[in-house]
Image (spheres, helix red, strand yellow):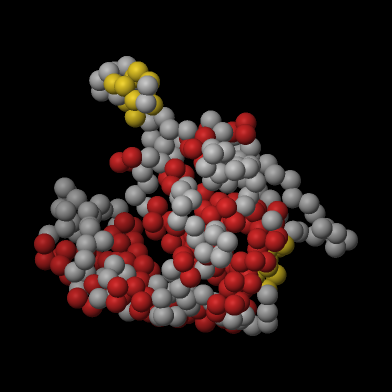
Amino acid sequence: MICFVQVMLLCSEVQHKAQEELDEVFGKGCLPKTTDPNSLPYISAPIHELLRYPVPERLRVLTSAPATPHMSIKDDWYNGYFILAGCIAVGISWSVLHDEEVYPDPGAFKPERVLTAEGTLDASVPDPMAAFGFGRRICPGRHFALAALFQDIAHVLAVFNIEKPLDEDENVIELKLKWTSRLFPVPKPFRARSEPRFEGVAGLLQMAVQLCYERSSMWSVDVKRHAQVSTCGEAPPDRMSRMFSPRQRSIRPETEQNTSQSSTRGPYVSAVVYRVRVILPLVSSRRVVCLNITQKP
């Protein structure tokens, strides 16, 4: 999200196009109620570009961090390269996400590169999943991260204009790009302004937050009832069955019926909120519980 705010300050035309799409689909003065990326292609397109955000070239080696190093267990050949046993291989994410043959002009932020002439998502453009790593050790939370990023960006752009800061004389302060030089490069702190796009933004957000709390509290879990688990990290079968009652299972977004329902439950509310609500008390109790939360009922 930090990179997103930075991009909105540098590429105001991207922000305006995304807001026009939101106003056309949902109307101005409303929060988006969808989790389908295809319904808002110009919200999904900037997210694709954010995953391969052009950090300074001097930091390109450091941006290989998402790729977990691997060690070869035997001599092997791969695409004409001989790899000795015991060698450590690290995927360079920066090179993958800045390949000029795949992403022309890779140093520019162009959401249009993943869109067709009709304005829909282009399936022929590779997803920049290299940002989450490679192989069996790819980030297991990538789908949750993309869904959360989609909702957060859509909600922010629906109600706020992200603008450059002003000095004491009301003059615009130009943004200076500075990045940290560490394993995971991130933008250094910078200033920005968020201006409401219409009257009543505060009331709309308060209503959305209140509605989220009311609906999520319906599915809250008694922490004391589930805090005691065995030392091996497995909860007793009876407790496991009670953690996900039939009523809770019915709101999971894996089925087609529940997917359609989750997008109409109200602003800033989705089925994933309830799933996280169930897991977080178990994590906060400093116990490890292995649960397959994606298993269909």
- Outermost residue, right side: 169
Is residue 113 in sight in this rendering? yes
In the displayed structure image, the side of residue 287 where residue 199 appears, left or right: right
The residue lying toward the viewer, choosing from 43 and 276, is 43
The vertical placement of 268 against 59, above or below, is below
| Quarter the N terminus occupies | bottom right
Q: Position of residue 127 (x, y in %)?
A: 45, 50
Against 156, is 4 above or below?
Answer: above
The location of residue 204, given as percent across then percent down, is 57, 81
Residue 119: x %, y % from top left = 56, 64
The front one of 72 and 288 is 72
Q: Please tell me whether residue 112 is drawn above or below residue 105 in the rendered image.
A: below
Expressed as whole percent of the image width and height from the top left, the position of residue 251 reads 29, 75
Residue shown at 21%/66% (left/top)? 296
Measuring 29% from the left and 21% from the top, which residue is drawn there? 76
Residue 272 versus residue 37: which sits nearer the camera? 37
